[in-house]
Image: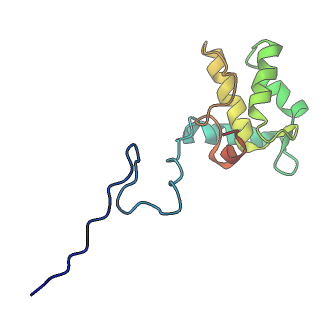
Amino acid sequence: RLALKTPPPPPPPQGSSEQVGSNPYGAAPPPAVAWSVSPEDKARYDEVFGTLAPAGGKASGQTVRPILERSQLPVDVLRQVWNLSDIDRDGALDADEFAVAMHLTRECTAGRSLPATLPADVCPPSKRHLLPS
């Protein structure tokens, strides 16, 4: 009896990371990066944000300014905190952006320097699609 055998599939090209069962439509998205704002800190920041009586879920710079100034950081540092935190560039902060502002402010008061651009782990998951790739 003659048995027909199917040849084995060719090996993936050199340097390819293709695995058996991989998505034929392209690579899977990178694994989610954990948010550096802890759930406990986020809950605290949400409480403070609620006291600002945000209109439409947003707090203006005028409303947020006194909260950030409590840190006693220089105005130029606070300006950079705001620029990094207003991820969607609408001139106001939502609860997640406010948490970023508070987190960055706390990092600065602990002696750490601000990043030039917002790292993915500091950006809230709800806003990561707005980060440049």
Q: Give the residue drawn at x 83%, y 15%.
A: 75
**Picture coordinates of residue 67, whole percent (x, y):** 79, 27
Q: How is the image coloured?
A: rainbow
Single out the residue that lies furthest toward the left.
1
Single out the residue that lies furthest toward the right.
62
Pick the residue in front: 39 or 11: 11
**Drawn side of residue 46 relative to residue 65, left or right:** left
Q: Give the residue drawn at x 86%, y 52%.
A: 56
**Picture coordinates of residue 100, whole percent (x, y):** 68, 34
Judge whether residue 69 can be spotted in this image: no
State which quarter of the image contains the N terminus. Answer: bottom left
Q: Is residue 127 above or below residue 110?
A: below
Pick the residue in front: 10 or 24: 10
Q: Give the residue drawn at x 75%, y 14%.
A: 73
**Drawn side of residue 99 relative to residue 13, left or right:** right
Single out the residue that lies furthest toward the front.
2
Query: In this figure, what is the number of numbered marks?
Result: 0
Q: Quadrant of residue 64?
A: top right
**Picture coordinates of residue 24, whole percent (x, y):** 48, 63
Pick the residue in front: 60 or 3: 3
State which quarter of the image contains the C terminus. Answer: top right
**Picture coordinates of residue 50, whole percent (x, y):** 76, 44
**Drawn side of residue 88 relative to residue 99, left or right:** right
Judge whether residue 105 can be spotted in this image: yes
Single out the residue that lies furthest toward the bottom.
1
